[in-house]
Image: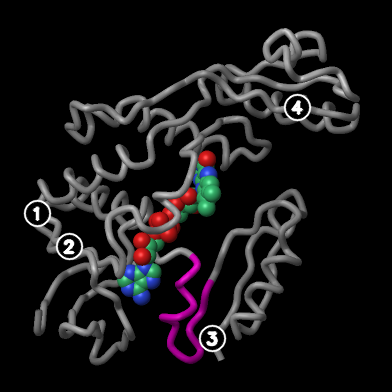
Amino acid sequence: MTAVATDVLVVGAGFYGLSSAWAMTQLRSGARITVVDEGEFASGASGRNGAGFRMQWGLDLNILLSKESTAFFENAAELLDYPRGIELKQDGYLVLAHSQNALDRLNASIAIQHRYQVPSELLDADACMKMVPSLGRNRLVGGTYCAKDGSASPFRLLDALLIACRREGVDVRYGTRVERIEKRNGVFTASTKDGTIEADRVLLCTDWAAPRLLAPGGRLIVELGAGQELSVRTLFTNTGLAIVTVRNDLSGIPRALVANAP
Ligand SMILES: Cc1cc2nc3c(=O)[nH]c(=O)nc-3n(C[C@H](O)[C@H](O)[C@H](O)COP(=O)(O)OP(=O)(O)OC[C@H]3O[C@@H](n4cnc5c(N)ncnc54)[C@H](O)[C@@H]3O)c2cc1C
């Protein structure tokens, strides 16, 4: 490869990279899309996970997003034209509470889930133990259960996305590491060992590796899970990033962390 020109360059071929590329083909046909990954198929976190999904969340946005995702998983084989299927198993998630306080919070979340017709239910300790007899009572107060939650095969889902992307004309290349990205005259130039890729838009889907590609002063914004602010701050600071600000969500929980490359 010497110089390649594309409309959109996606860096990283995990779930985020491949599903974004596929979604773009559905939104705008004819766009030239190139996906590069430094590793092999499924070599990142997307090939190392349980691919579990659930709609049992406590924030409206999370519930809405997971509802959309669940509907996608339920129809993925048809949507992606992948007859082998993604080994979807909707055998339910049981979320346990070991204090009344925790059960009250789960119950409050259920009220929000029901606003969006998520079929979750509150269970007492006996019902939880009946569902999973090996649990044992051991401070168990109760839990919540949603039969529509479940899991899929991460490899099948990635394979389905890869095949669908290539069918739509997306150029997916493995073993291609982006070393540096620069912007000149409104065009991004990504340098790889085999040459350069010029793109109007760049989508970084490199997961934890994103800071390596930030230009000096480049900005990284990530969502914080509840209670994760300190560990994410430490992780970022150890990577050499400067924390700019942390924003709370509407419930007052630290939710978005903004950092700058030095
Ligand atoms: C053990 C484990 C269990 C998990 N279980 C679940 C679960 O049950 N449910 C769930 O929803 N989530 C789960 N997750 C989280 C989930 O796996 C990740 O959130 C998701 O896979 C991230 O996808 P991604 O595309 O952002 O990253 P990745 O899959 O890591 O893809 C990023 C890609 O970028 C490539 N890359 C990086 N730098 C460059 C570069 N400079 N040039 C080119 N390519 C580059 C990498 O090679 C990699 O393939 C789990 C994660 C782990 C580790």
Q: Image height check: is 88 above or below 188?
A: above
Answer with mark 4 or mark 3, whichever residue precedes in sequence: 4
The span from disc 3 to disc 1 (Cα, nearest Å) is 35 Å
Task: Find numbered disc 1 in the image and state the secondary structure of the residue it sits on.
Answer: loop
Answer with mark 2 or mark 4, whichever residue precedes in sequence: 2
Q: Indicate the amino acid at tag 4.
A: Leu
CB under 8 Å between discs 2 and 1: yes
Tag in front: 4 or 3: 4
- Nearest to the observer: residue 106 or residue 193: 193
Tag in front: 2 or 4: 4
**Rendering quadrant holding ligand 1:** bottom left
Q: Hey, which residue is sitting farthest front in the picture?
A: 134
Q: Position of residue 75 (x, y in %)?
A: 30, 26
Q: Image height check: is 203 above or below 133?
A: below
> Is-magenta flag for residue 218?
yes
CB under 8 Å between discs 2 and 4: no
Task: Return the residue at label 2.
Answer: 33
Figure quadrant of the C terminus? bottom right
Answer with mark 3 or mark 1, whichever residue precedes in sequence: 1
> Is-magenta flag for residue 227?
no
Answer with mark 2 or mark 1, whichever residue precedes in sequence: 2
The reply to whether the residue tagged 4 has its Cβ within 8 angstroms of ligand 1 is no
Q: Residue at x 61, y 38 (%)?
A: 60
Task: Return the residue at label 1.
Answer: 169
Task: Return the residue at label 4.
Answer: 96
Task: Return the residue at label 3.
Answer: 261
Few, some or many C-alpha atoms within 10 Å of disc 3 (few <14, some 14-19, many ≥20)?
some
Q: Indicate the amino acid at tag 2.
A: Ile
Query: With 157 as the anchor, is 117 left or right in this view?
Result: right
The span from disc 2 to disc 4 (Cα, nearest Å) is 44 Å
